[in-house]
Image (spheres, helix red, strand yellow):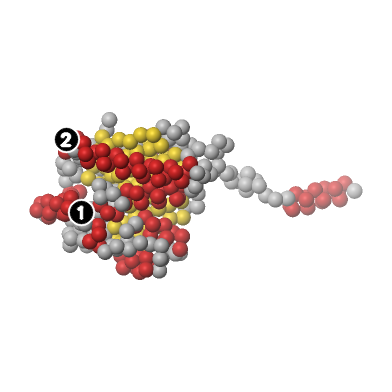
Amino acid sequence: MRTYVVLTALVLGLAAPVTQAQQGESSTTPATPITALVIHGGAGYVARDALSTEDENAARADLDAALDAGNAILSSGGTALDAVEAAVQVLEESPRFNAGKGAVFNAEGGHELDASIMAGHTRRAGAVAGVTTVRSPIALARAVMEHSPHVMLAGGGAEAFADTRPEIERVPNQWFDTHKRRRQLEAAQTKAQARADTSGEPGRYFGTVGAVALDQRGHIAAATSTGGMTNKKWGRVGDAPIIGAGTWADDRCGVSGTGWGEFYIRNAVAHDICARVAYRGDSLADAAQEVVNTIVPAAGGDGGAIALDRDGNIAMPFNSGTMYRAWIKPDGNRGAAIFED
């Protein structure tokens, strides 16, 4: 009889459902759901006296609108992925930031746009590089993630994929033209150099935009979009569409970078920040600070990053004079800033 009881218990145990804890997994949903959102409109060297009150107010209004778009989704129980896409799309529509409508000109007088997006809890990601007729590159990056077996599509291939997605809005390349960017191209060509050739150049601006969000499920997502470098040649691609360089998200941490792309790629900046949190146990603030303000400058680069962890902690380090940024913390505290103070 004792043998029968033991065998019965074993059979019942085998038949019982295996919980996440028994599988060595745990839900990322916090006991009390929280949300947080942080966005950026690019880092660079914009002098205070070079930014008019009108331009500063307009930029802040755009940052507020992007925060509102993302936070509305998070507050209603929506996903971090939807939130970062919505926030970035608002910034892509602004002529004040180097993404979407405000994209810089390449050396041929056209526009080539890059973007990437990543869902931390699944590690799924999508990216596009060198697209020329897509109004919202971040929307196409998400379509690559969700409707193709690939992570990145580039150039003509990305455009051909966009042809298969009726939800992706198309525009002529000239739609991205602005007088401000045309003047920047003329100035860069007069100097016969790309704007990133001289560290600390007055007015130099890394015009990436990005967002990182934490939703009520405890999931993190990150997204980044850019027009690249003024006067860029030969199909140059920076860090913005490179998963691990300009964008990264996992179940602990998410990052969107803005800086000298070549150095962000070489140092895998976005991933390095989250790796320090995951494997070394660094706080988010310490990890972001060390990578952006020590590792990148030591290699010869500069820029900034926004980062967010699953506890709602936010970090926004930069080693240039300015970084357009805004945030909403779990307690509802909301703010925006451009300069170091």
The answer, for residue 91, to whether it is visible in the render is yes
Query: Which quarter of the figure is the C terminus placed in?
Result: top left
Secondary structure under the numbered disc 1 in the rendered image? loop
The residue depicted at 29 percent of the width and 39 percent of the height is 60
Q: Nearer the viewer, residue 77 or 238?
A: 77
- Residue 172 in the figure: left or right of residue 89: left
Q: Amino acid at mark 2?
A: Asp
Say which quarter of the image contains residue 39.
Answer: top left
Give the CA separation, mark 2 to mark 1.
22 Å
Percent x, y of residue 273: 39, 42
Percent x, y of residue 262: 27, 51
Percent x, y of residue 70: 41, 45
Q: Residues within 10 Å of mark 1 (few under 14, many from 20)?
A: some
Q: Residues within 10 Å of mark 2 (few under 14, many from 20)?
A: few
Looking at the image, the residue that sits furthest to the left is 190
The residue depicted at 74 percent of the width and 53 percent of the height is 15
The answer, for residue 220, to whether it is visible in the render is no
- Find disc 1 in the rendering and name its residue: 178
Q: Nearer the viewer, residue 152 or 338?
A: 338
Secondary structure under the numbered disc 2 in the rendered image? helix
Mark number for residue 49? Answer: 2
Mark number for residue 13? Answer: none
